[in-house]
Amino acid sequence: MVIDQQGAHERILYERVLNAFEKQMSATQQELFPKTIELNTTDFALVQELQPEIQALGFDIREFGKNTFIIHGVPADTVDHDSTEILEGLIENYKQNFQELRSNKRENLARSMAKKMSIKSGTALTQEEMNNLIDELFACKMPYSTPNGKPTISTIAIDELDKRFKKYF
């Protein structure tokens, strides 16, 4: 069994975000030094429209003049990341998903957040991290695919592996 770590982590985060939306409970970590983010007019209008949902994710953002927001807090599980980068990535992923999928706001934001915050392919994980990822993946409602429908798990039979390696001996 081969597991796509990025796809698996996207699935885990996606379901976690949807669950937080459903329960209306997302933890926010306040920024020690709030950050200012200036957006283009289109992105600013999009964030204004999505502000209740973005705040439900755990962001604490407030308008601050023309095309500008101040980020006072971020979702608690994102504190190791740059808050402006997270918000910008969330907006970009949201726009891309909207064009491709035409899903509702919350589902789109959940997909966007999961994609932005997931462990990237090629990132080395410890054995404990791999085990936790597998445990969390199989605790998901839909562990076999990413939020975009790509497989997270591929099973290769032993005889298939034997066939592939025998041609080298």
Image (cartoon, grey):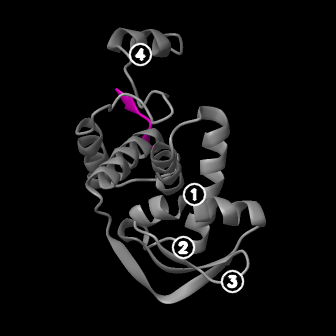
Label 2 Cα neighbours within 10 Å, binned few <14 / some 14-19 / many ≥20: many
Quarter of the picture holding the N terminus = top left
User: Label 3's element?
Assistant: loop
User: Could you tell which of marks 1 and 4 lies nearer the N-terminus?
Assistant: 1
User: Label 2's element?
Assistant: helix
Residue 89 visible in the picture: no
- What's the residue at 72%, 70% (across, down)? 39
Where does the image place residue 158, in percent across and percent down from the top left? Answer: 33, 14
User: Could you tell which of marks 4 and 3 lies nearer the N-terminus?
Assistant: 3
| Residue labelled with disc 4 | 161
Where does the image place residue 167, in percent across and percent down from the top left? Answer: 53, 10
* Numbered disc in front, either 3 or 1: 3
134 up-or-down from 64: above or below: above
What's the CA distance linking mark 3 and mark 1?
Answer: 21 Å
107 up-or-down from 17: above or below: above
| Residue labelled with disc 3 | 65
| Residue labelled with disc 1 | 90
What's the CA distance linking mark 4 and mark 3?
Answer: 60 Å
User: Could you tell which of marks 2 and 3 lies nearer the N-terminus?
Assistant: 3
| Residue labelled with disc 2 | 83
Q: Quadrant of residue 15?
A: top left
Disc 4 residue type? Leu
What's the CA distance linking mark 2 and mark 1?
Answer: 10 Å
| In the foreground, 108 or 4 | 108
What's the CA distance linking mark 1 and mark 4?
Answer: 40 Å
152 up-or-down from 47: above or below: above
Q: Mark 3 and mark 1 in contact? Answer it, CB < 8 Å.
A: no
Query: What segment is highlighted magenta in the picture?
Result: 1-5
- What's the residue at 51%, 75% (across, down)? 61
- What's the residue at 37%, 20% (across, down)? 155
